[in-house]
Amino acid sequence: MKNKPLAAIFLVVFIDLLGFSFILPLLPYFAETFGASPFVIGLLTASYAAAQFVGAPILGRLSDRFGRRPILLLSIAGTLAGFLLLGFANTLWLLFVSRILDGLTGGNITVAQAYISDVTDEKNRAKGLGMIGAAFGLGFIIGPAVGGLLSQTSYNLPAFVASGLAFINLLLVYFWLPESLTAERRAVLAGGPARPPFTLKAMLASLNRPYVGPLLHTRFFFGLAFSMFQTIFSLYALTRFNLKVQETAYILTYVGLLSVFTQGFFIGRITKRFSENILIFSCTAIMSLSLLAWAFAPSVLLLLIIMIPTSVSGGILNTVINSAATKAVTPAEIGGVLGLSASLESITRVIGPTLGGLMLERLGTGAPGLFGFAVLALLTWYIWRYILHSESVSSLMPQAQPVPQPVQIEE
């Protein structure tokens, strides 16, 4: 990764997710100190996603109009403020305020994905977006373990350390990250199709477009099952196996290793051998079976084995769905469609932890896995019918001419 913009955006995402993963495994334990029930803990996790549902498509579309760099700065500043509030929180309602603030401005991953789409061609798009996933995974390798160690002092300390990382990120973007929507690229886009209006109706119209709509539907239902697995996992580990916060953090570190391998190494190779449509179909089928196995995992050892296909298929799906979506819209719509994709995923992070927490509390620890299996089994049929044998409609649309000499990502 010798290209400066790619290296810079990789570091931005890595530092951001490092801070986020400091607090992720300990948030349920932090909330429990204020007497929160499993259902309220689910609502706390959902509050971040609910706010991101509103903020992500707006930030994505704003980045299409005003550039990626200023919106990244705005987003990271909101993250910094949210972590500071979390560090000073001494009541349950302040925990909610901190997560809502971070969620409203937490569209930096979406904008980073749009940045990658700006500086890569279609051939290298999935590999470039895989770098975002690899940075995400690296954050989860280091973050949960360090956060778990810091939490032994207090639950506030990881939040303060995370706010320091957000400040470093702010400086990194300001001083080192160049704008990807350069004057040259803006001129190219100006000569292409008219820029879509900045309205909710215009963004939601994407759900009814050929190929793009089914991709976004897939994003939602896959996200519903996968977000329930991710967000309820700490509570699941505590309830089913009585794991402590440090032990849960180490398991999430293991998941991070699998994610880095998948998105930093494997994704570039597998997308050269198989079409994105085939990967979306097959990985959804694999994920459904993995969640079924998760529902009946009898031991931590078997749980770790089950997480291999779960993490690999999830990592591939997260990358190729967005990659396919960016190729099915005009360049002037990339930030908007990625923001809408993130917004749909955010809805799942409202429904997933809330419903998952309720099912776990009322129906037992296997219920979230069985629910995820049922959703993804039906989604597999939907993908077979509406995506697997479809072609991207990007070739049928009026496209702006690409910016000369896109980035070539070296092995």
Image (cartoon, grey):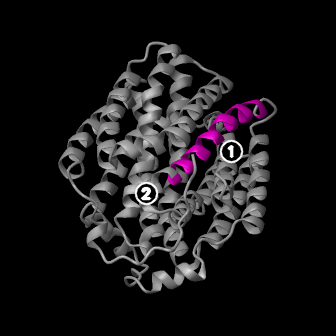
List the single residue furthest toward the left. 385
Q: Which residue is drawn at 64% across and 33% down?
A: 29
Sequence order check, earlier mark of 1 and 2: 1
Q: Where is residue 301 in the image (x, y as percent from the top left)?
A: 52, 14
Q: Where is residue 291 in the image (x, y as percent from the top left)?
A: 37, 29
What residue is shown with label 1?
Answer: 18
Tag 2's secondary structure? helix
Q: Residue at x 43, y 57 (%)?
A: 123
For label 2, count other residues whose C-alpha is less than 10 Å away and answer few (under 14), some (14-19) or many (20+).
Answer: few
Q: Give the range drawn in magenta.
A: 128-150
Residue 153 placement: quadrant: top right
Q: In which quarter of the image is the C terminus?
A: top right
Left or right position of 4 against 282:
right
Q: How far apart are marks 1 and 2 (CA)?
A: 29 Å
Q: Residue at x 70, y 66 (%)?
A: 177
Asked if 298 appears above or below 34 in the picture, the reply is above
Q: Position of residue 174 (x, y in %)?
A: 75, 68
Left or right position of 16 against 258:
right
Residue 12 placement: quadrant: bottom right
Q: Which of marks 1 and 2 is in front?
A: 2
Q: Which residue is drawn at 44% across and 22% down?
A: 306
Image marks 1 and 2: residues in contact by CB distance under 8 Å: no
What residue is shown with label 2?
Answer: 123
The amino acid marked with disc number 2 is Lys
Left or right position of 167 against 206:
right
Left or right position of 350 against 208:
right
Magenta: main secondary structure: helix
Residue 227 in view (yes/no): no
